[in-house]
Image (tube, grey):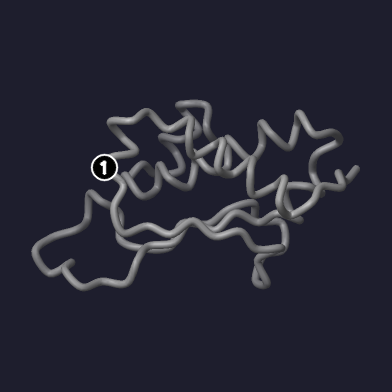
Amino acid sequence: MSVSMSEDRFEELVGDALDRIPPELAQAIDNVVVLIEARNSDDPHLLGLYHGIALTERDSHYGGALPDTVTIYRESILAICSDESEVVEEVAITVIHEIAHYFGIDEDRLHQLGWG
């Protein structure tokens, strides 16, 4: 079952999810761009994707790198939710999950923490 939602409302939910990141962690996020796209062309069921160099892997050669990206796939999330409250929750989980990759947290640990 799919939920219908305006792009503006979905963007607002992504912003709300980013606001849930504790301030001490949010301040540590540097050189990251959050994008919203309809779907991932390679994997249409993917909900989000982090692309970049995790904070734990950055070294003295990192300077001048292009920004890392966190992409949230709107249509993929809307397709798996049955109402707006589910969308709110799934957006939060997806945003936190992808930001966690920036901090070097892998899939296994995210699943252990309940953010899988």
Q: Residue furthest right?
A: 1
Query: Residue at label 1?
Result: 28
Residue 81 percent across, percent down from the top left: 80, 39
Compared to residue 17, the image places residue 104 above or below, namely below
Residue at the image point whose x is 44% and y is 61% from the top: 69
Helix, strand or loop at mark 1:
loop
Identified at 50% across, 33% down, the residue is: 111
Q: Is residue 44 left or right of residue 1?
A: left
The one nearer the camera, 83 or 15, is 15
User: Between residues 8 and 34, which one lies in front from this camera angle?
Assistant: 8
Expressed as whole percent of the image width and height from the top left, the position of residue 73 reads: 66, 56
Residue 45 picture location, percent across and down: 71, 56
The percent coordinates of residue 114 (x first, y second) are 52, 27
Pick whichever, 37 or 54, lies toward us: 37
Going 36% across and 41% down the picture, which residue do you hit?
Answer: 105
Name the residue at the left extreme: 60
Say above or below: 76 vs 99.
Answer: below
- Left or right of 59: which side holds 45? right
Q: Is residue 116 left or right of residue 61?
A: right
| Quarter containing the C terminus | top right
Instruction: Decide if residue 23 is on the left or right side of residue 61.
Output: right
Q: Considering only vertical position in the picture, is 71 above or below 87?
A: below
Amino acid on which the number 1 mark rests in the picture: Ala
What is the crowding at mark 1: few (fewer than 14 residues within 10 Å), some, or many (at least 20)?
few
- Total labels: the figure holds 1
Question: Which quarter of the figure is the N terminus placed in?
Answer: top right
Q: Residue at x 66, y 37 (%)?
A: 90
